[in-house]
Amino acid sequence: MKVLVTGGAGFIGRWVVKRLLDHNHSVWILDDLSNGSLKNIAEFENNPNLNIVKGDIKNQELLQQLFLNQYDLCYHLAASINVQESIDYPKTTFDNDTIGTFNVLEQCRKHNVKIVFMSTCMVYDRASNDNGIKEIDPIKPTSPYSGSKIAAENMVLSYFHAYNLPAVVIRPFNTYGPFQKSGGEGGVVAIFIKNSLNNKPLYIYGDGTQTRDLLYVEDCARFIVKAGYSDNSNGEIINAGLGRDISINELAKLIVKDESRIQHVKHIHPQSEIQKLLCNYEKAKHLLNWEPQVSLEEGIKKTEEWIKSDI
């Protein structure tokens, strides 16, 4: 197939691209490199099936040109993903995550290309029990990031219903692993591991009782790719996660072993914190025959080995 991956030079994007290339598809990456990096995809640069285009999903002329390649499938991963930045600069996040998605959708509609839209678990309200969050559970936009993603989700699903465009919304839970940035906000596992290796304190926002369902990146990429391949996914919203949550306090202890190096600091955006994130992935199992294969302990070990090799 011919496949477009927006945001393909990003952390999750590069694993999706790797999987698609392993399956011998012709892959185009569109990335403005604001969040992604050519370093992430350096190992594929000599692959004759890979085409790299530096550009922005807000550039409609560029998208029109690209879609002349007659893609079979579009994985739309490009987005602004930083919660605090969305609070500080909501227009940037809305322009990238909602309007950018609309631009990609329009081209998919004109050329009848299936779109896999990467949303986020951050659209949900907190998990109310230990059965995990299902796709039909309440959503709660607590930041412009989650608000922009919900708006884009609704547009994607509207194109499925209005135009019969093959489209799926995916909501992976907190993804971690090799190639994730270990600075700034977002990659809690990568940040903790790097600080642990560098004998620095592990800083936790708030009291650390908030929980996360941590999904290893290769499991996440396998899920994303499967959602594109399967007709069962069309018109659906589908979660993916480990099905196990861990408090940030427990995660820090798992990584650093020495509790004296764990420090709690004031939360920068407590209003946008989700206290309990736990995924119910039964729908992905049923529709896509997908389930996670890498345990949290194994995933942390693999991530630590990669960070060590990159330091």
Image (cartoon, helix red, strand yellow):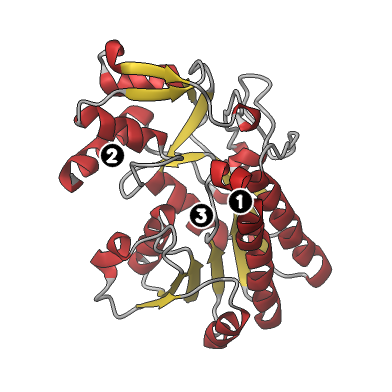
Residue at x 32%, y 20% (from the top left corner) = 254
Q: Position of residue 81 (x, y in %)?
A: 53, 49
Q: Position of residue 167 (x, y in %)?
A: 67, 63
Q: Secondary structure at mark 3?
A: helix
Q: Which residue is mark 1?
A: 89
Q: Nearer the viewer, mark 3 or mark 1?
A: 1
Q: Which residue is mark 3?
A: 224
Q: Which residue is mark 2?
A: 303
Q: Nearer the viewer, mark 2 or mark 1?
A: 1
Q: Give neighbour class at mark 2: few <14, some 14-19, many 20+ (Cα, 10 Å).
A: many
Q: Position of residue 92 (x, y in %)?
A: 61, 58
Relative to 41, say whether 70 is above or below: below
Residue at x 70%, y 81% (from the top left corner) = 110
Q: Secondary structure at mark 1?
A: loop
User: In the image shown, does 310 or 25 lie closer to the viewer?
Assistant: 310
Residue type (three-letter) at the residue carrying disc 1: Tyr
Q: Mark 2 and mark 1: span between their CA atoms? A: 31 Å
Residue 284 appears in the picture as rendered: no
